[in-house]
Amino acid sequence: MTPATIDTIIFYLAAGLAVGSAFLMVWQRNPVASAMFLILSLVAQAALYIQLDAIFLAALLIIIYAGAIVTLFLFVIMLLNLRYEQFVEPSGGLSRIIKVALAATFAASIIAIVQRTLGGGEPFQVLSGAELSFSSVKEVATALYTRYVYPFELVGALLLVAIIGAVALAGKETQETASPK
Amino acid sequence: MPTTIGVEHFLIVSTLLFTLGVLGVLISRNIIIMFMSVELMLNAASLAFIAFSRLHADASGQVFVFLALAVAAAEAAVGLALIITLYRARGTIDSSAFSIMKW
């Protein structure tokens, strides 16, 4: 097998896994199972990132998304301590059919546009040497700290605001019970 | 099955993931699963950014994905705090129970 064939096989495996587990995530009743399928989908997406030479971001996706954000989801699910009867079913009947039809129309139109504008084009040209370094940690960091330094600072401020907001929202109740008026 | 993969294949995967995220928000009545679907939509957009970054051999697309990751983390923190507050107020995670702002 040529490297191109192996690449294609890996792409279809990862893409199928990402889309399939995303589908299963949506159709769950139990939020814990849903979170597990989200992790599976994220790992497959990281494989796609590696195929696109974005190795640094593939590692970040696993560490931050699968490692931190989904864990936060699981913590909250654990904290709420739901009984099985409280897991609500997805909406069914006519409204579900209409929603699926709308989503399918949306996907079909976007895919049609992609095929019209970019389809049948040449595949990615093989990069080598200095060209390939565009996705190295060094290149990404240089762009982040020079050209995009203001967005980077702003995102730091956003994280600070989010932390304060989360504590203010979730900590409110305990504060009131601790000091009743 | 084509033997070579190009940018359009990655964009189609990205579209499918985004659509599944939209479908999750529309169909699910569990607010936690709805919130996970929003995260899935963010990821789908990131995949499109990375595909174009590879196409143009430019690191800018990857910087945007990095920033989107930070925004997603902030969003998850605030969103989950909201879910906890909502659960305390109503004792359920059924989104149809939170209709006080609905006209």
Image (tube, coloured by chain):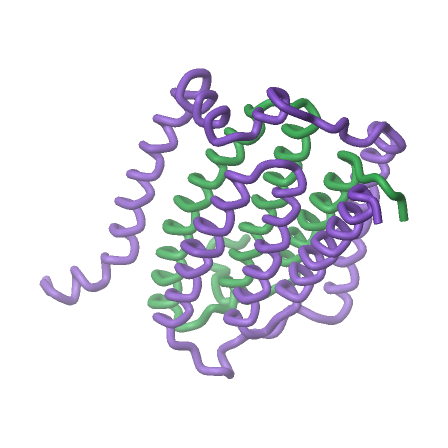
Chain the render paints green: B
Estimate the x, y position of residue B22 in percent, counting from the top left: 65, 51
Counting from the top left corner in percent of width and height, residue A132 is at 62, 26
Q: Is residue B16 left or right of residue A164?
A: right
Q: Is residue A57 above or below residue B38?
A: above
Answer with the quarter of the image where residue B88 lies: bottom left
Q: Nearer the viewer, residue A145 or A153?
A: A145
Q: In the displayed structure, would residue A11 be above or below residue B30? A: above
Q: Kindly identify the residue that appears in the image at 44 percent across and 26 percent down.
A: A141
Query: In the image, residue B34 lies at what x, y percent?
Result: 55, 58
Q: Is residue B98 left or right of residue A111?
A: left
Chain A representation colour:
purple
Q: How far across and how far down the image is residue B93, in percent? A: 47, 68
Q: Quadrant of residue A58?
A: top right
Q: Residue at x 66, y 66 (%)?
A: A24
- Residue at 62% from the left image edge and 33% from the top image edge: B49
